Image (tube, rainbow, N blue to C red):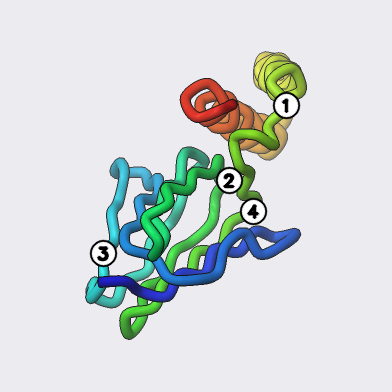
Amino acid sequence: MTFPLHVLAADKPFYEGGCESLVVPTLDGAYGVLAHHCNTILAIIPGTLTFRTEDGREEVAAVASGIMKVEDGEVLVLVDSAIRPEEIDLERQRRAADEAKEAMLQKRSLEEYHAAQARLARALARLNVKRKYGK
């Protein structure tokens, strides 16, 4: 059984088509969706998104924060960014993580601290996806 899946990043559509299964990262851990899932809305955190297309191909992406909505058997994933493992630049992400760590150590506003924290989470998610699934 499959269901329609739309994964949209802020800058471009990532995937639109049939899907057998989907797993998204949430605060409570990995959350899975299969066909006929009940209607729900949940927050997505930076991490690994995986899904199996209707032709059985496994797709993986490093995603930033966003939301997922399941309604009437259709799934919509809206995230700030979604990047395939082969598109991730390891050195760039290492630098981004280091810069975010440095920004968190500096005594600045709470807003700047949280922004640096978000940048660090995004960079670490991308590094993890690249290490695990990169080619």
Residue matched to label 2: 64
Q: Are marks 4 and 2 in contact (CB under 8 Å)?
A: yes
Location of mark 3 (residue): 34
| Amino acid type at image mark 2 | Ala
Sequence-first tag of 2 and 1 = 2
- Label 3 Cα neighbours within 10 Å, binned few <14 / some 14-19 / many ≥20: some
First reached walking from the N terminus: tag 4 or tag 1 = 4
Tell me the CA gap for discs 1 and 3.
Answer: 32 Å
Q: Is residue 80 above or below residue 46?
A: below
**Residues at discs 2 and 3 in contact (Cβ within 8 Å):** no
Percent position (x, y) of residue 9? 65, 59
- Name which residue lies at 49% across and 44% down: 60
**CA distance for labels 2 and 3:** 22 Å
Residues at discs 2 and 1 in contact (Cβ within 8 Å): no
Label 3 is placed on what type of residue?
Leu
The residue at which mark 4 appears reads as 80
Q: Residues within 10 Å of mark 1 (few under 14, many from 20)?
A: few
Q: Which mark is residue 89?
A: 1
Q: Residue at x 70, y 60 (%)?
A: 10
Give the Cα distance between marks 3 and 4: 23 Å
Q: Secondary structure at mark 4?
A: loop
State the CA–CA distance, disc 4 to disc 1: 18 Å
Q: Residue at x 69, y 17 (%)?
A: 94
Q: Residues within 10 Å of mark 2 (few under 14, many from 20)?
A: many
Of the residues under marks 1 and 3, which one precedes in the sequence?
A: 3
- 119 and 81: which one is in front? 81
| Mark 1: secondary structure | loop
**SS under mark 2:** loop
